[in-house]
Image (cartoon, helix red, strand yellow):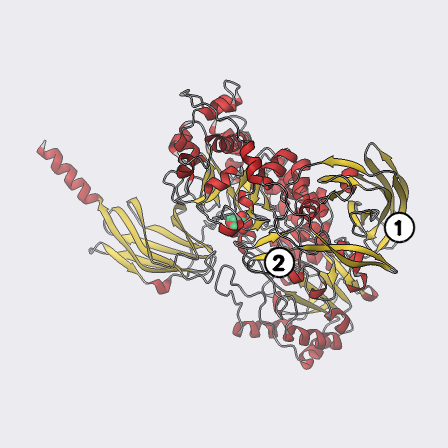
Amino acid sequence: MANKIFDITEFAKVARQAVAEGVVLLKNDAKVLPLKEGTRVAIFGRSQFNYYKSGTGSGGMVNTRYVVGVYEAIEQDGTLEINSNLRNTYEDWVKDNPFDAGAGWAAEPWFQKEMPVTKELALEAREDSDVAIVLIGRTAGEDQDNSNAKGSYLLTDDEQQMLENVTKAFEKTIVLLNVGNIIDMKWVDKYNPSAVAYIWQGGQEGGNGVLDVLKGAVSPSGRLTDTIAYNIEDYPSTNNFGDSKRNIQQEDIYVGYRYFETFAKDKVMYPFGYGLSYTSFDIFSNGFIVDDGQVKVSVTVTNIGDYKGKQVVQAYVSKPQGKLGKPALELVGFAKTKELKADESEIVDIVFTNYQMASFDDSGVTGHKNAYVLEEGTYVFYVGENIRNLTRIGTYNVGRTKVVEQLTEALAPQIDFTRIKPEACEDGFSISYEDVPKATVDATDIRKANIKAPIAKTDSDFKLVDVLDNNCTLDEFIGQLSEEELCAIVRGEGMSSPKVTPGCGGAFAGVTDSLVAKGIPTCCCTDGPSGIRMDSGKKAFAMPNGTLLACMWNLDLTEKLYNYEGLELRKNKIDVLLGPGMNLHRNPLNGRNFEYFSEDPFVTGKNAAAQLKGMHKMGVTGTIKHFAMNTQEAYRHTVEHVASERAIRELYLKGFEIAVKEAGATAVMTTYGSINGYYTSSSYDLVTRILRNEWGFEGIVMTDWWAKGGKAECGDSTDMAAIVRAQNDLYMVTQSAKDNTNKDNLVDALSDGSLDISELQTCAKNICQFVLHTPTFARFIERNNELDIDLANEAEDDETEFDNIIDCRIDESGSAHISTDLIETARNSSNTVSVSFKERGDYKLSMRVRSNATSDLAQIPLSIFRDKELVKMVTLTGADKDWQNVEVVFENCAMTFFMRLYFAQDGMEIDDITISLAKSKEEEFRLMFARMGEQ
Ligand code: BGC
């Protein structure tokens, strides 16, 4: 590493490598790729002007210093020769058809109108070019699912026409998909382009990583983490996706390849784990040993082609059907080689455990209800380069069904429904259905039976640091907190609280003066999965998205990338990143799939764990979210997910379990929706019994922003008592914890006995325990905070831009009006107003603001700066449709200053902007002298 501790250039190199390794090449006929130096390329598709660095919403709101798209990367590099006539044609067209940003949060279009490509245009381009590159782009995101419609999951007519005409005119066409999710791929058979690759959404270095693959500096080693079927209807979850009230998960554990490999192999176009390289590999098994509940597989990988490259080795197990029924194959391990030269070999080891091979019996059919069991029979092990290209390496016999872990019933469904079960037939398995076991215990009864005795109230004067120094126990420290303080500490503040780094998502812990006086500092968290989101407009590094990173199958590289993310968090005084997002790709239409990793829980858990380990090295952490089952964005605040306990444990919780057990996750965010009768924020089974008691999680659990609590049928965002009872420690977010601006029911619940003070004390303990390990606490007590000091001393890049300055002169009248026409309120707009005046003094900005966002859930921040200093942030939600007054006083203005209004999102309307003299210095002096004269 160079001299700087946080070196953005090094960060960018690692991100670029990650993008290159995440590209999944699906087709490469006649080795059209890699492209030789000097190849003349004709670049089609308007996405050359608007590379999607990420999806939308909180997982994409990073203010980047730059974004290199595919076109820019090719142009800057100069190795390939771009057809400039074609580019000019596009440039002219884009002038008349500019990027359509839509109506803001959750209302951005999924695609941009494509330039019609006629046969003539394609043939003309062919005359001066050897190869066509076609870029197709899509976005989606928070509050906005994909749909099985043209322009979303399907290609538009213009895109089809472009492909048809380009593939006819060119012998060599390379199609690059700049998308967050997998999309319908039937067009590949129809137009038969030479090469097709998913380049995903790669953050600010995206184009550079893709360039490295195109020209062969990197041989592709990305592999699909989802199954691509021919039709969206082929996914068994499609029938139960997108409902506003309830999704009944009949497909049970048969999600993704678990379904297709068991029941519908012929519906698969590209199998799970698939991806091509510029070379080929031999994967040879050196055998395996079973030892102490672990299986150790050794594999020799040899590069038998003529190009350098890395290979991913995947290990699967086929379990006996037994009484439970099992998917045909399950992924249990993977490893990636280093870059191997032609003829070079490497031995890689893959280890997996009995626990990974076990299945959960939620009915008792094996004789062991609520246990992970290894059912008797033969377990067959395979290794290979994808799920369809495997070598059987041996078998392992279990003589009698073994219990691997006995648990107790939790989160079981409360209504009747049936689920898929395999039934052996002539050529494999057919689908049969069985009744899903229902809940037999009530989580509320279990909670009541486990309420602890309260910690007695004391009047000691311990500070939090006394817990660290063993001068008192955490219980003794908590015993001093008053009821008011206990109610305040569970309320997180935000968005953009002035108590922490400007523009961040939330402040928590020391949110009132009295808590701070007890030595609890205010900690800071912010989004998110694709880099740090600071709505103040401060710049941060835009990361490649979750799906891309998972497709690398390279956990070491992920960890390294997240070392840099950790440093950037430290530099910005942020303790907790609100990511990784790790919900399963249950269905390709989920709008937030780009943030998430895979249809497979093992891949998901391993990736989340690697990100956490990377950040932990720098003393900060990430929040694993959304716990659990946030598998659709439409109606996410209201929809109830109904699933069997087996599916919940084997699939939807598994990734979280891995992140907790393997990487020591210490922060969790629950979802907006509900599972089997309870909002996740208020699910005692989910948060206390499974997360904390079974997995040993010791950390904080926070709600999603402005989430609801309570039972599924009566969710209420003021029902904080239900949230605390589940041990979901923090309600995120309220404007003022002290004033209880969210009007939560804590005080009432304490007085009517529906909440026990010990339950609040437990949450306060979880929060304080967490705070003890944060960088903010180290700074607060001025110990072990050298890294922060060093980082603070590193020069900041100058980010203030002073172009398009609006002139505002205040004359003798003492006030000036600024026309709203001059203020640009679109997303990422920065307006600089030069305020000049005759009289020194305090000046006041007054204006009115309201939301005009289409979605009530939109988050719309405005940051107000005086010169470089942030003086106020106003965050509206989409529902704030009435005018609100905003006033900001700029004190002691002696000469012209620059006022900057920065809009991080679309959707805010402003009016009546006036700057006026609030207090004149001359007048102040005059009065002062007059008073002195009187004395
Ligand atoms: C999202 C979370 C995010 C939070 C704060 C919510 O709308 O679901 O993932 O962390 O906002 O921005």
Crowdedness of circle 2 by 10 Å Cα count: few (<14), some, many (20+)?
Answer: many
Amino acid carrying mark 2 in the image: Asn
What x and y, as percent, mark residue 442? 58, 41
What x and y, as percent, mark residue 782? 49, 26
Amino acid carrying mark 1 in the image: Thr
Q: Give the secondary structure at mark 1.
A: strand
Q: Which residue is mark 1?
A: 391
Q: Nearer the viewer, residue 368 or 690?
A: 368
Count of numbered badges drawn on the protein: 2
Residue at point 69%, 79% (across, down) = 124
Q: Nearer the viewer, residue 243 or 126?
A: 243
What x and y, as percent, mark residue 713? 51, 52
- Give the left or right position of residue 552, taking residue 617 as reference: right
Crowdedness of circle 1 by 10 Å Cα count: few (<14), some, many (20+)?
Answer: some
Image position of 109 with respect to 735: above or below: below
What x and y, as percent, mark residue 24? 74, 57
Residue at point 63%, 75% (across, down) = 158
Q: Which residue is mark 2?
A: 590
Q: Which mark is residue 328?
A: none
Q: Is residue 539 visible?
A: no
Question: Hey, which quadrant is residue 619 in on the image?
Answer: top right
Q: Quadrant of the N terminus?
A: top right
Q: Quadrant of the C terminus?
A: top left
Image position of 234 with respect to 746: above or below: below
Image position of 627 with respect to 200: above or below: above
Q: Give the secondary structure at mark 2.
A: loop
Q: CA distance from mark 2 to mark 1?
A: 33 Å
Q: Earlier in the sequence, mark 2 or mark 1?
A: 1
Give the farthest residue toward the bottom.
120
